[in-house]
Amino acid sequence: MKQGQAETRRQNVAKRSMTKEARQLTGLIAGLRESLERIHKERTGTKLTGAEMGMLDERRNNLLLTIAALDDRLSAVQGLIDLGRPHIIRVH
């Protein structure tokens, strides 16, 4: 019985940990999307040189890639929670 309780406790800790990670990812993605919007406004709102426009395009592309990767991670975390199979994800 103690082994079952320990497993339940591990599952609960893992679920809390993954839920916290999902909230953090959601906040991070929202902040990056705001940065993306600011870049878009800056790009369309002022007269820019080719180099400045290129720099903003590079930043936009990097943000889009980062957002896509974080969206994938968020989807994976939410999927594991929804399946009832949370586990503590170790990142090295």
Image (tube, helix red, strand yellow):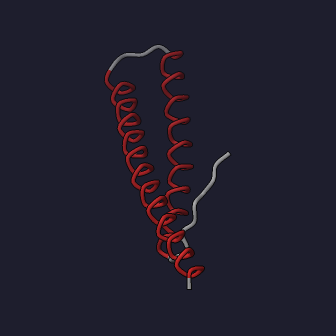
Count of labels in the image: 0
Q: Residue furthest bottom?
A: 1
The correct choice, above or below, for 53 with respect to 80 in the image is above
Q: x, y percentage for residue 73?
A: 55, 55
The correct choice, above or below, for 28 with respect to 44 in the image is below
Q: x, y percentage for residue 18?
A: 48, 60
In depth, the one of 37 and 53 nearer the eye is: 37
* Residue occupying image coordinates x 46% and y 54%: 21
In depth, the one of 13 and 47 nearer the eye is: 13
The correct choice, above or below, for 71 with respect to 60 in the image is below
Answer left or right for 25 relative to 58. Answer: left
Q: Quadrant of the N terminus?
A: bottom right
Q: Residue furthest right?
A: 92
Q: Residue furthest front?
A: 2
Q: x, y percentage for residue 56?
A: 48, 25
* Residue occupying image coordinates x 57% and y 60%: 88
In depth, the one of 26 and 21 nearer the eye is: 21
Q: Quadrant of the C terminus?
A: top right
**Residue 6 in which image quadrant:** bottom right
* Residue occupying image coordinates x 55% and y 35%: 62
* Residue occupying image coordinates x 47% and y 13%: 49
